[in-house]
Amino acid sequence: MTANGLSRKTIVIDGVPLPDVLDERMIRCVVHGFYDEIGRDELLGPIFHDRIDPGDWPRHLAKMCDFWSATLLRTSRYEGRPLPPHLAISGLGEAHFRRWLKLFRATVHRICPPEVAALFMDRALRIAHSFRLAAAFSRGETTMAIEPIVEKDLDAGVTCG
């Protein structure tokens, strides 16, 4: 049962029921917390500030909440295509994806219980891998050597700044 007394449909992700604690409020906290970090970041902040006007941030944040709601809660609110705007960013590379994942990891681990943070990170790592492959492919590069980034390796390898 939810706080309003209504029954919530059980959502199963990768064979495991979604924890009841993951709800729209938590998604909103993660999205807003993450973009607060992005805004202050020396590598990623300028990319976002160059592409999103100050007055458009509320709309962007709402869209990202819709994206994560659709991704984890299986709602149907998000109807966008996240890949094309990222492909339009020239020079988007490994350091950017690793920084994005590090900031996202710090945010979800600060806000969410461990099982929910793990769900967010699993999806974020999959999204990053897909985007990395697509970016290389769109530049005519081979994708054969692009290995998925795993969470335990975020602090090793490529430096991010």
Image (spheres, helix red, strand yellow):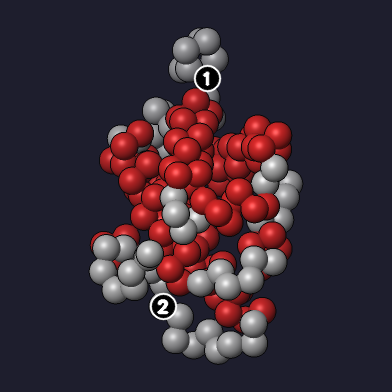
| Nearer to the camera, 79 or 8 | 79
Q: Residues within 10 Å of mark 2 (few under 14, many from 20)?
A: few
Query: Regarding mark 1 in the picture, which secondary structure is present there?
Result: loop
Amino acid type indicated by mark 1: Ser
Relative placement, left or right, of 161 versus 2 is: left
* Residue 84 appears in the rendering: yes
x then y, percent, for residue 68 = 55, 42
Q: Is residue 75 visible?
A: no
Which of the 4 image quadrants contains residue 70? top right
Direction top: furthest residue: 4
Image vertical order of residue 97 relative to residue 138, above or below: above
Question: Against 138, is 81 above or below?
Answer: above
**Placement of the C terminus among the 4 image quadrants:** bottom left
Image location of residue 47, percent across then percent down: 58, 56
Left or right: residue 115 compared with residue 148: left
Where does label 2 land, which residue? 147
Inter-mark Cα distance, 1 to 2: 41 Å
Q: Secondary structure at mark 2?
A: loop
Give the label, 1 or 2, closer to the camera.
Answer: 2
Residue at numbered disc 1: 7
Q: Amino acid at mark 2?
A: Glu
Above or below, 39 against 161 in this view is above
Residue nearer the viewer, 161 or 146: 161
Q: Which mark is residue 121?
A: none
Residue at 33%, 46% (x, y): give it. Answer: 106
Of 128 and 40, the residue lying toward us: 40
Q: Residue at x 52, y 19 (%)?
A: 7
In percent of the image, x 47 and y 64: which residue is there?
Answer: 96
Q: Earlier in the sequence, mark 1 or mark 2?
A: 1
Q: Picture coordinates of residue 4 (x, y %)?
A: 52, 10
